[in-house]
Image (spheres, rainbow, N blue to C red):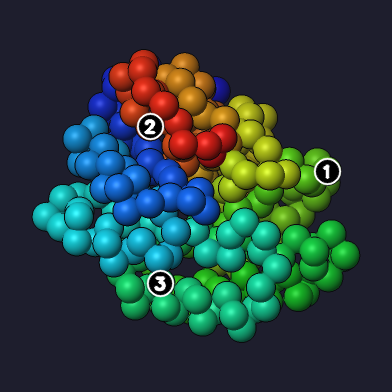
Amino acid sequence: MTVKVYTTQEIASKIQHTDVNPDVTREDIIKLTNDCMEFKFDGVMLQPCWIEEAKVLLAGSDVKVCTALGFPMGGLTTKSKAREMAEVVALGAEQVDFMPNFGFFKSGMYEEFEHELREIVKAADGRVTKVMLEFGMLTQEEKVKAAEIALNAGVTYLKNSSGWGKGGHATIEDVQLLKEIAGDKALVKASGGIRDFESATSILNAGAVLLGTSAGVKIVTGTGETSNSY
């Protein structure tokens, strides 16, 4: 593994600063977007209901507006997810991280699992899609299979976890696995438990090109609060 020494600004440019808590307020969104502009984070990650607000707050900046779809359970119907994808695209989301149906996957319903992924990617109409693979609930063999199915479905990014619940934390081993599977066909985003400069650097060196975290400010300054475990 090639070890790169990152500057603080290089790390910041890889962070998608996140608050997807159910009780997030408008004031929280204002602070989140202000932090993104101040520290030059790659993007803001928020719930779909805040997309339009974020577009206004971030107007004129380079910060991407990103949202989470089917989150956190993934149990919506495929048609519902496709309709939600079309809606968030229309609202102005530039990138969408989505939760697939792991009930399908764990049941061995791989065709249904892949069909859902393909329908969601199709509905994204060319926008960047990132599938949350929830490695914390998968065996090693399942990790490989889920990632391979997602790759075949045409997602832009393979992502180790939502960072919530059973999704688990980002590890060097999991990121390296995703990078190996992705090859030159997809990119890797890492999420879950990335809360300091050292861990961010290690995960990037393992092969991730984006980091999802609520600890963006803490990572680049060494101080500050995080909104959740994401």
Instruction: Give left or right: position of 188 versus 58.
Output: right
Instruction: Give left or right: position of 6 versus 120.
Output: left
Query: Quick one: label 2, few (<14), some, or many (20+) residues within 10 Å?
Result: many
Tell me the distance, in whole angstroms, between the alpha carbons under discs 3 and 2: 24 Å
Q: Which mark is residue 216?
A: 2
Q: Pick whichever of labels 1 and 3 is earlier in the sequence.
A: 3
Return the residue nearer the eye: 203 or 20: 20
Task: Kindly identify the amino acid type of the residue bearing the numbered disc 3.
Answer: Val
Residue at the spot x=38%, y=51% of the render?
25
Task: Kindly identify the amino acid type of the residue bearing the numbered disc 1.
Answer: Thr
Q: Where residue 164 appears, x then y in whole percent? A: 62, 44
Instruction: Give left or right: position of 118 versus 30.
Output: right
Give the SS element for disc 3. helix
Q: Nearer the viewer, mark 1 or mark 3?
A: 3
Residue annotated with mark 3 = 88
Tell me the distance, in whole angstroms, between the alpha carbons under discs 1 and 2: 30 Å
Q: Pick whichever of labels 3 and 2 is earlier in the sequence.
A: 3
Report the label total: 3
Q: Are marks 3 and 2 in contact (CB under 8 Å)?
A: no
Query: Quick one: label 1, few (<14), some, or many (20+) residues within 10 Å?
Result: few
**Where is 133 relative to 85, above or below?**
above
Q: Pick whichever of labels 1 and 2 is earlier in the sequence.
A: 1
Residue 151 shows in this picture: no
Residue annotated with mark 1 = 139
Query: Quick one: label 3, few (<14), some, or many (20+) residues within 10 Å?
Result: many
Residue at the spot x=27%, y=58% of the render?
54
